[in-house]
Amino acid sequence: MPLQQQRPTGKGANQEAVRRHNLGTLLGHVHRDGDVSRAALTTRMDLNRSTIAALVAELERLGVVAQATPRGDRQGAGRPSLHVRPGEREVCVIAVELRVESIELARIGLGGAVLGRRSAPMAPGSNPDDAADEVVRTAADLLADVADDALLVGIGVGMPGIVSTEDGRIHYAPNLSWSDVAFSDLLEQRIGGAIPVVIGNDANLGVLAEHARGVARGMTDVVYLSGDVGVGGGLITRGRRLLGTVGYAGEVGHMRITVDGRRCRCGNRGCWEAEIGALAVADALGTPSHEIAHLVDLLDEVDTPSPPLREVGLMLGVGITNLINIFDPQAVILGGLLSALYPAVRDDVDAEVRRGTLDSEDRRTEVLLPGLGRDSVIVGAGELAFGAMMSDPLAVSSAAEGALAQVRAAPLPR
Amino acid sequence: MPLQQQRPTGKGANQEAVRRHNLGTLLGHVHRDGDVSRAALTTRMDLNRSTIAALVAELERLGVVAQATPRGDRQGAGRPSLHVRPGEREVCVIAVELRVESIELARIGLGGAVLGRRSAPMAPGSNPDDAADEVVRTAADLLADVADDALLVGIGVGMPGIVSTEDGRIHYAPNLSWSDVAFSDLLEQRIGGAIPVVIGNDANLGVLAEHARGVARGMTDVVYLSGDVGVGGGLITRGRRLLGTVGYAGEVGHMRITVDGRRCRCGNRGCWEAEIGALAVADALGTPSHEIAHLVDLLDEVDTPSPPLREVGLMLGVGITNLINIFDPQAVILGGLLSALYPAVRDDVDAEVRRGTLDSEDRRTEVLLPGLGRDSVIVGAGELAFGAMMSDPLAVSSAAEGALAQVRAAPLPR
DNA sequence: GTAATTTTGTCACTGAAGCAACAAAATCGA
DNA sequence: TCGATTTTGTTGCTTCAGTGACAAAATTAC
């Protein structure tokens, strides 16, 4: 069933939607694989050769893809199929990650290639306006030596905090001490509304990244956990992100797993992040709180875990078990600090998961480490920014005309 | 955006898919509202009048809908719009609910009308084969006096247990002491494969029912909880059921909320259902376990809850809070025993939910009681059975030709 | 009763995908 | 080396779903 009925809207469809869908899907394949043969596209999309040819031709006309006879390595008999790759005209996005100490930017091209990076300092206690200025300034720098005909189709921002999907507002970002900031508006104002700015939280982008280019490629149901002092969750179900009504879905950090447990920043007791977050790990290792930054290294050195650390592992296992029972995913991916914690307490986690989840032949959820490491948020921000392009290439590419120049020339204070 | 790209498949679309989508969506509107004007369809589906006319004409040709000038009550000026209603040819499904003590059946028509009911005893310790025989026998009875040209388009089965979506296997049904039963196969064999049999668990069908015809109409993200001795969850996100990889999603009963809590049937401690299930409620009320069937009445009589009962309420609140934080739904619906428990301990539950969830203007999850009461599972089973019809009316209705006769004449032992 | 409003049916038109036939390119086998 | 085979790309034609414009029909308001 190629088209999916989106029940709540109950809207009808027309040929134009088909064309949009097909162009977007085809471009998605190119973006995903970097290089696909037309024959492969024909098979995968289950369309006629002629149709694929027409679709590719249209995208080629826009300059976003190019066709070429394949290089060297042959496979099987028959005339070799033309390959479709990102085109002459460079299609790219700016991916931004707001961290507590720095702002990371990357320019990411169609196909997922990282074409450039910049890092800017995030002054302690920076306010959102300063940060937005810095982002735009650095983005302009990053775009300075890009070909003039390049197509900048979006800006994606990732950050630790609670983000409202619809309006791009940051509801609350404890690590940055921001609350109720319309950050995507701040950026859009500075670049003259040239291009849409989309924003997501770190765990949400983590799962997007791992699903698109990490260990969860090809899966349909994935839970991603990003652990630090707090714990966030990113969810993919049926191959799409689960965002909830406002976009606040995935706040698993305050899932209560022991009502009488450790006290959490939120005031409650026994929140999951109080039990497995950086503070709990530091306590278990006997690390003073100012050395929390080195927890990863300390965890790497753990050979046989101490009883307190094993207790943390147990709690990790309990929470993972809850999520498996709730979501029935193919994998749970442990990001951030958790990817250092897990190897240290693997036995306890695995035992708890086995004990608490039903384990049939057709269902065996894997617990995995991320495939993208530190880059997951910025890669996810790139994927997020590319999203619109993959659902309506024509509209987005025509809207993006001139955006590059506009961002380069963004007026900034000082 | 009328068509939704189903990312994982990456398939293309064609005009045929558009037609399918539009016919299905239109029929879905008729099914949902029972009676829609063509003008309303034009607005809602955002299609041309001519297109709507053509679509209605095609469905009318099949006999599944009929057009008529509206009765009496007029609204506004202008030529009155033709109304579309379920057609002369009766389109229906058989909805089945397997309970511990009985098997309930209903015949449900397009539009959601319950056209007939039967109840059959479920002998204690019945095996699946006996139950399947009984279902088919009762279904034949239920279909005895139906017009010969009626179209039986599906059979939906709901039951308490863990069900695999793809193959319709019941993995485990503790209350019935069944495990690993291919129940939909058992039914399909008996009716000669005339018609697809779809199966779902009670909480999953509960949320489907409340979403289609209960308090959650029009919502996009809903959590439904069905409480008894165990607690099950049914989830809707983006207007569609969340099933997970195998269909085991929503098993919230064994979500651990206090690691050192009451012992659960599963062997663990502090599972949610151990804290808020029937046994916990009975303990809190001081009710002996053999009177567990009267818990609803006892809870109705509660005026001011006792401290132990308030503790149960607290645990209910904690679990609901967890789910709100994870899913960010518009509503959490409390079904089964929980709909009796909630009014008794409402203050404690609400306080806990307020305390544990962030509460912004655009996000205020409601805790609701079901709108369908005892019927939710059977209504949900009906909706489930109608599902295929709403995504491809042509294919389903032609496949259903002759199914009625085949079910009536199903060969049965004795 | 007349005008305004709204909906309907009809029909020619547009646009997208499918199909079939033919030509081209590469591989495999003798 | 050459022909048979396989696979692909191209082209013109067909099919079909949705659209827009027009005139007609039914109702309400003045």
Image (cartoon, coloured by chain):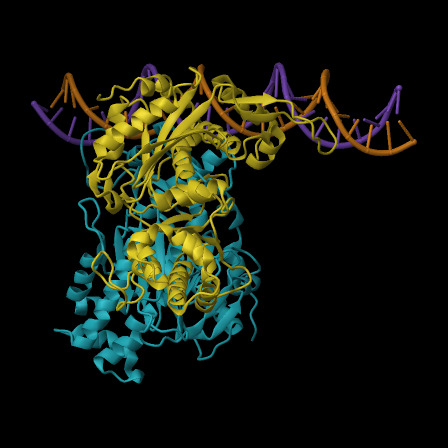
Chain colours: A yellow, B cyan, C orange, D purple
> Which residue is depicted at the point 54% across and 24% down?
A56
In-image side of B242 versus A185 (left or right): right
Residue B59, percent across and down? 43, 40
Instruction: Depth check: give the residue in front, C16 or B363.
Output: B363
In the rendered structure, the answer to whether residue B240 lies left or right of residue A162 reads right
Side of D12 relative to B158 (left or right) = right
**Number of marks in the rendered image:** 0
| Image location (x, y in percent) of residue B11 | 52, 37
Q: Nearer the viewer, residue B360 or B237?
A: B360
Q: Residue at x 35, y 52 (%)?
A: B236
Q: Nearer the viewer, residue A363 or A301?
A: A301
- Res. B63 in view: no
| Residue displayed at 45% across by 66% down | A348
- Foreground: A309 or A133? A309
| Residue A414 image position (x, y, % from top left) | 22, 21
Residue A372 in the image: state x and y as whole percent: 47, 43
Q: Is residue C14 above or below residue B248?
A: above
Q: Is residue B291 visible?
A: yes
Residue A279 falls in which quadrant of the image?
bottom left
Q: Please determine whether, in this image, residue A371 is positioned above or below residue A19.
A: below
